DNA sequence: AATAAAATTGAAATTAATACAAAATTAAAT
DNA sequence: ATTTAATTTTGTATTAATTTCAATTTTATT
């Protein structure tokens, strides 16, 4: 894990989002900023239990719920049992490879928001999720077929 | 529930999708065609248990898994615990009202598929999910504020 | 230091989904 | 038509993500 943020930077990040910093909150934020893999609550827990031996799963859920409420993270729902969390709340799409399970980001242009023209709904957020096979897995499959 | 399909029509629908018709499959299909509310497995079960008293939840899951495999339904994942099922597999978006919980369809133009330009992924399906407040709930909120 | 407020923990409960063997039903073969 | 084989359905048990909530611990305030 790349360590690119100082404690002070992490604290400020939380404060700017109206969140009182605590050890767990700082560690969860640090994990999210340094591991942009759309982790599940359990991913975060499994990593941080090494750093905080008394850590409970509930604290991870509490922290993520707070982050969600304060707009620090968004959630992604990719037809899996587990919710994933994304520190990147800027408009972008997600692609899930059905072979390796990896989730990639992809750019989305604002024209998608044409949807918003409708007077029927007040849209607060939009998710664009694609499913298929990533380049790596495609190449692997092609090799095997030869 | 509007009854708009004959048993024969339902059977043909299944056969065309390479599914051997059975009582449960016909009833689940009928429910999906007549109740376009993006139901969960439990929604379907709760309705059909009245018609088939020995029905088991597992049969609903088996049936829906088969329908999914054969392309009769698609699933939607709306940040809820439960998966929803949609008999409309044609490209369209989903809007979930965060107040009343209702899920609406909305039209999506093909230009969204520009995403596909990317050489990185082979895209098999795309989900476009929006979240916010529906017209009805908005009007209700406005009334209460007066 | 005492008190109040907030955060964290841990155990239990909830529940959607899955696994799988037994039972029931349907189809095929004799 | 009866037996056999194949398929479908059922029911129980299990798994695992999330939630609930009271007790404990930590942090902030008087």
Image: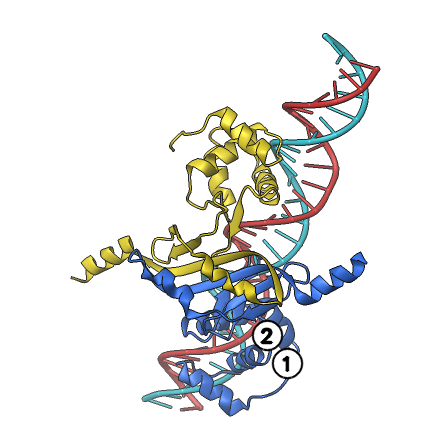
Chain colours: A blue, B yellow, C red, D cyan
Q: Chain of mark 1?
A: A
Residues B137 and B10: in front is: B10
**Dot 2 surroundings within 10 Å: few (below 14), some, or many (20 or more)?**
some
Q: CA distance from mark 2 to mark 1?
A: 9 Å
Residue drawn where x is 46% and y is 35% of the image: B31
Q: Position of residue D2 (x, y in %)?
A: 76, 11
Figure quadrant of the C terminus of chain A: bottom right
Residue A46 vertical position relative to residue A145 in the rendered view, above or below? below
Residue drawn where x is 24% and y is 59% of the image: B141
Helix or strand or loop: what does disc 2 sit on?
A: loop
Helix or strand or loop: what does disc 1 sit on?
A: loop
Q: Position of residue D24 (x, y in %)?
A: 53, 74
Quick check: can you spot residue A132?
A: yes
Figure quadrant of the N terminus of chain A: bottom right
Q: Which mark is residue B40?
A: none
Do discs 2 and 1 share a chain?
Answer: yes
Q: Position of residue B9 (x, y in %)?
A: 50, 28
Q: Position of residue A120 (x, y in %)?
A: 30, 55
> Quick check: A42 left or right of B106?
right
Quick check: can you spot residue B83?
A: no
Identify residue for label 1.
Answer: A51
> Quick check: B85 left or right of C21?
left
Residue drawn where x is 62% and y is 64% of the image: B121
Dot 2 and dot 1 residues touching (CB under 8 Å): yes
Q: Which mark is residue A55?
A: 2
Query: Which of the 4 quarters of the picture holds residue A109?
Result: bottom left
Residue B51 vertical position relative to residue A34 in the rendered view, above or below? above
Residue A2 vertical position relative to residue B44 in the rendered view, above or below? below
> Quick check: B23 left or right of A139?
left
Residue A103 vertical position relative to residue A23 in the rendered view, above or below? above
């Amino acid at each position: 894990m790349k360590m690119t943020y100082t404690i002070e930077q992490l604290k400020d990040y939380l404060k700017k989002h109206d969140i009182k910093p605590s050890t767990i909150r700082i560690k969860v934020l640090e994990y999210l900023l340094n591991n942009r893999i759309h982790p599940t609550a359990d991913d975060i827990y499994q990593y941080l239990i090494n750093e905080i031996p008394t850590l409970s799963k509930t604290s991870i859920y509490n922290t993520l719920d707070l982050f969600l409420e304060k707009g620090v993270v968004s959630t992604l729902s990719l037809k899996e049992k587990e919710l994933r969390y994304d520190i990147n709340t800027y408009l972008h799409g997600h692609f899930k490879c059905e072979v390796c399970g990896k989730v990639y980001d992809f750019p989305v242009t604002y024209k998608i928001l044409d949807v918003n023209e409708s007077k029927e709904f007040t849209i607060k957020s939009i998710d664009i999720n694609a499913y298929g096979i990533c380049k790596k897995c495609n190449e692997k499959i092609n090799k095997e077929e030869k």
